[in-house]
Image (cartoon, rainbow, N blue to C red):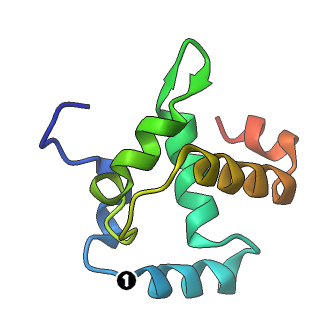
């Protein structure tokens, strides 16, 4: 992704707040907006098969319109791990 280029994946949430997205996801799933967005980013931004967690955390507000602050690598890792605990691996592989 080039500087200034808009990440397309979260376009429909451009004018939404974190709480709105989180509430909508909680009605439909058991995931938080944080877990869902970061898991999606980790799947999309890989280098040699590994997620770019530091880069994702540093660029989070630019990548996801409803996320307001930057995250540390450990915060990104924790959110991805929470997603993986809640969503069985078979489901993740089936949706690729």
The residue shown at (76%, 35%) is 93
Horizontal side of 43 relative to 77 (left or right) equals left
For mark 1, give the secondary structure.
loop
Q: In this view, does 70 lie above or below 50?
A: below
Question: Which residue sits furthest left?
Answer: 4
Horizontal side of 71 relative to 9 (left or right) equals right
Compare residues 51 and 40 and report the one nearer the observer: 51
Q: Label 1: which residue? A: 17
Mark 1: few, some, or many residues within 10 Å (few <14, many ≥20)? few
- Where on the picture, by quarter, is residue 42? top right
Q: Is residue 62 above or below residue 51?
A: below
Q: Where is residue 72 in the image (x, y as percent from the top left)?
A: 52, 50
Horizontal side of 35 relative to 15 (left or right) equals right
Q: Is residue 39 above or below residue 33?
A: above
Compare residues 3 and 92 and report the one nearer the observer: 3
Q: Where is residue 41 in the image (x, y as percent from the top left)?
A: 50, 44
Question: Which residue sits furthest top?
Answer: 48
Q: Which corner quadrant holds the C terminus?
A: top right
- Where on the picture, by quarter, is residue 85? bottom right
The residue shown at (59%, 50%) is 76
Q: Where is residue 67 in the image (x, y as percent from the top left)?
A: 40, 68
Q: Position of residue 44 (x, y in %)?
A: 49, 35
Q: Which corner quadrant holds the N terminus?
A: top left
The residue shown at (57%, 87%) is 23
């Amino acid at each position: 992704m080039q500087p200034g280029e808009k990440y397309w994946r979260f376009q429909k949430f451009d004018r939404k707040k974190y709480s709105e997205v989180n509430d909508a996801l909680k009605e439909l799933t058991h995931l938080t907006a944080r877990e869902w967005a970061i898991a999606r980013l980790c799947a999309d931004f890989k280098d040699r098969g590994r997620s770019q967690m530091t880069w994702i955390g540093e660029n989070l507000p630019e990548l996801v319109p409803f996320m307001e602050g930057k995250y540390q690598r450990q915060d990104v890792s924790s959110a991805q791990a929470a997603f993986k605990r809640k969503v069985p691996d078979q489901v993740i592989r089936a949706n690729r």
